[in-house]
Amino acid sequence: MDVSSHHPYIPVGMEITATQSGRGRPREFDPEEALAAALQVFWRRGYEGASLAELTEAMGITKPSLYACFGNKEALFRKALDLYERDKLCYVKASLEEPTAKAVAERMLRGSLAIQTGNTDPQGCMGVISSVGGTAHSECIRDEVLARRASSDRALLDRFERAQAEGDLPTGVEPQALACYLSTVIQGMAVQAGAGVPRERLEQLIDTTLTMWPSK
């Protein structure tokens, strides 16, 4: 395989088709498909709740193959976060390109809801699930999730500061408070979606938030 075409979430030098040794003929597996399966487990169970046995069963590989291809559980989780941000949070960048702060908020809220209440993925937000609760053993994982969230929050704050400079926000509205408010609503929606709150009720929450949104 040409190294220049390797997948960004698979270690350099790892073939896209890997082999799993054992009795008889080696069994091939696709590391990207295995990583996608691991993402589903982490999303549903959180970092602490996802056991190696559950991960390897979902991925269709053995523990030695997991370590050889992805590293340890923590490294696997980080790669799963990368995949989550690439495939599930792609709406965030598009949201920040909207022409007004209110349009940014609406696209982020509706994009979040689509992910949180989709039919093919676990309910709720992977970042929220993995950072709420846990033990000291997973402190580094919570720090990782929070660091990524801080980066996203910074991008949102920059966008609202630009909105303020362009005269898009009413006088007296602080961009930092507005960004924090929007992030809090999105995180709250994720928690409620994970608890089984109907999509229709969360859509009402979005409508109410947009009705109350400060604009000229």
Image (spheres, rainbow, N blue to C red):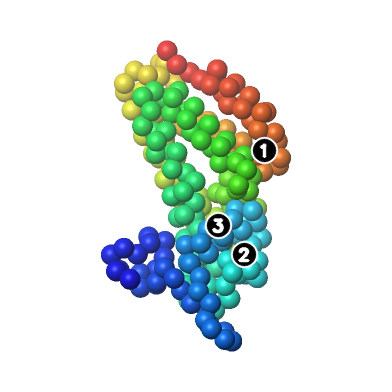
Q: Is residue 5 above or below residue 114?
A: below
Q: Which residue is mark 2?
A: 58
- Cβ–Cβ below 8 Å for labels 2 and 3? no
Q: Which residue is at the far front? A: 25
Q: Which residue is mark 1?
A: 192
Q: Which residue is at the far bottom? A: 23
Q: Which quadrant: the N terminus? A: bottom left
> Mark 1: few, some, or many residues within 10 Å (few <14, many ≥20)?
some
Q: Amino acid at mark 3?
A: Leu
Query: Dot 1: what SS?
Result: helix
Measured in 3D between alpha carbons, the distance from the residue under mark 3 to the one under mark 1, in whole angstroms, is 21 Å
Residue 86 place in picture, x, y as percent: 43, 50
Q: Which residue is mark 3?
A: 39
Q: Amino acid at mark 1?
A: Gln
Residue 92 place in picture, x, y as percent: 44, 39
Asked if residue 201 lies left or right of residue 37, the reply is: right
Task: Give me the residue at 62% from left, 64% from top.
Answer: 58
Q: Amino acid at mark 2?
A: Ala
Q: Nearer the viewer, residue 133 or 88?
A: 88
Task: Give me the residue at 44% from left, 71% from top.
Answer: 17
Q: Which quadrant: the C terminus? A: top left
Residue 183 place in picture, x, y as percent: 52, 36
User: Splitting the image into 4 quarters, where does residue 153 fall?
Assistant: top left
User: Splitting the image into 4 quarters, where does residue 96 fall?
Assistant: top left
